[in-house]
Image (cartoon, helix red, strand yellow):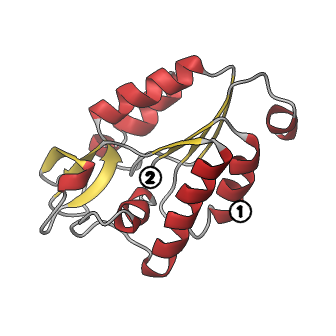
Amino acid sequence: LQGAVDEPARPLCAIVGGAKVSTKIPVIESLIEKCDTILIGGGMIFTFYRSMGYDVGKSLVEEDMIELAGELMKKAEAKGVKLVLPTDVVLADKFDENANAAVAPADSISGDWLGLDIGPDSLEAFAAEIAAANTIVWNGPMGVFEMPQFAVGTAQVAEL
């Protein structure tokens, strides 16, 4: 992994997922220094969305990390790193594998809905970024992969 990041065939694309921004901060900060593109997925996207002023319904948010998420986006922009957040998400009316699900744009989440996976438009955008990369590193799932209906993003990114 270190060789892939320290001496990559460019462009270098990192895929970072998982539930919490707080557990990925050192990873993201390091990748901003080394990557051309960073794709963000998993529950942590909702903390980034909140830093952008989006309503995220009942999605997971680390309130104490909202400001830092915004700072990471600014740092990436200043370094010329393309930081890509999902443009749509798979929502559920409860955290349950049998929940009712719907797809919505990232800036249109509201009410009691919670985001549990990246959406189909996001998968297309991620696929284009991955196809353009010569080196890809990946850390963390794109959604709640333990529940089949919310594992699509993780499974499809893995197949790209």
Q: Residue at x 75, y 48 (%)?
A: 33
Between circles 2 and 1, the one closer to the viewer is 1
- In depth, the one of 75 and 13 nearer the eye is 75
Q: Is residue 92 left or right of residue 13?
A: left
Residue 39 vertical placement versus 136 (above, below): below
Distance from Cα at disc 2 to Cα at disc 1: 17 Å
Which residue position holds label 2?
Answer: 42
* Residue 53 lies in quadrant: bottom left
Residue 88 on image: x %, y %: 27, 43
Residue 90 vertical placement versus 121 (above, below): below
Q: Residue at x 70, y 39 (%)?
A: 35
Question: Looking at the figure, which quarter contains the N terminus?
Answer: top right
Residue 101 on image: x %, y %: 15, 48
Give whichever of discs 2 and 1 has the lower sequence position: 1
Residue 2 vertical placement versus 18 (above, below): above
Residue 3 on image: x %, y %: 87, 34
Residue 41 on image: x %, y %: 46, 48
Task: Give the residue type that dot 2 points to.
Answer: Gly
Which residue position holds label 1?
Answer: 26
* Residue 109 lies in quadrant: bottom left
